[in-house]
Image (cartoon, helix red, strand yellow):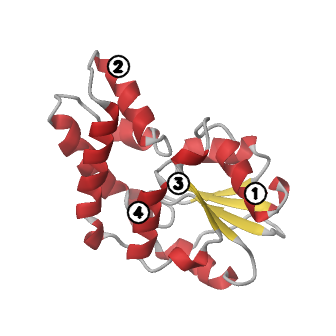
Amino acid sequence: MTLKLPDGPFKAYLFDCDGTIVDSMPLHYIAWKTTLAEYGCPFPEDLFYAWGGKPVDEIISTLNGMHGLNMPVEEVGIRKEGMYFDMLPQLTAIKEVVEHIDAQHGRLPFAVVSGGRRNSVIRSLTTVNLLDRFQTIVGAEDYVNSKPAPDAFLLAAERLGVAPASCLVFEDTSLGIQAATAAGMASVLVPSPLQRLG
């Protein structure tokens, strides 16, 4: 599978992390299911993928409201992330995206724009030896309004000193694509693991 990019030229590439640079979504789902099961909280796989790009704390709070639960948000988030970190040795990069990173590294500035916490992004990128490719990382701690709001992508463009219209966003979720569009940026959708196999 080759990723077809929209016509440029572009002056910066902005990448989501989970499911875009690294094939981490299946590992995150295992961590979510295992952690939430301790609280009797369902989290169907289709909902997990639909919420791709949503910060951890927001997911837990929303699930609490949906199911009338009172899960401790910070504690559940820490447990879930810890379980994900334990699975990092299984993590691989998505080669179709890495091809574009390799082709433009040193020519264009790159940023990671994630719904995940910065420490999770750093650990994921370190595991696949890609951390040094990115000039800045925008994590869930850096903005108030999460995807599909454009805030995170606009912050990344500002940090790189590049106009939003000159940025190309790589994303694997509809929330992320909506956020890129709202930021006035072109985007390319990275297929899910199932779509890449198909």
Label located before the other in sequence (2 or 3): 2
| Disc 2 versus disc 3: nearer the observer | 2
List the residue tagged with mark 2.
66
Find residue 26 and report its horizontal and vertical position in percent.
Answer: 31, 56
Q: CA distance from mark 1 to mark 2?
A: 35 Å
Res 77 quadrant in image: top left
Label located before the other in sequence (3 or 4): 3
Q: Are marks 1 and 2 in contact (CB under 8 Å)?
A: no
Q: Residues within 10 Å of mark 2 (few under 14, many from 20)?
A: few
Res 58 quadrant in image: top left
As drawn, 119 above or below 174: below
Q: CA distance from mark 2 to mark 3?
A: 25 Å
**Looking at the picture, which amino acid does disc 2 mark?**
Met
Q: Residues within 10 Å of mark 4 (few under 14, many from 20)?
A: few
| Disc 4 versus disc 2: nearer the observer | 2
Quadrant holding the C terminus: bottom left
**Looking at the picture, which amino acid does disc 1 mark?**
Ala
Q: CA distance from mark 4 to mark 2?
A: 33 Å
List the residue tagged with mark 3.
172
Q: Secondary structure at mark 3?
A: loop
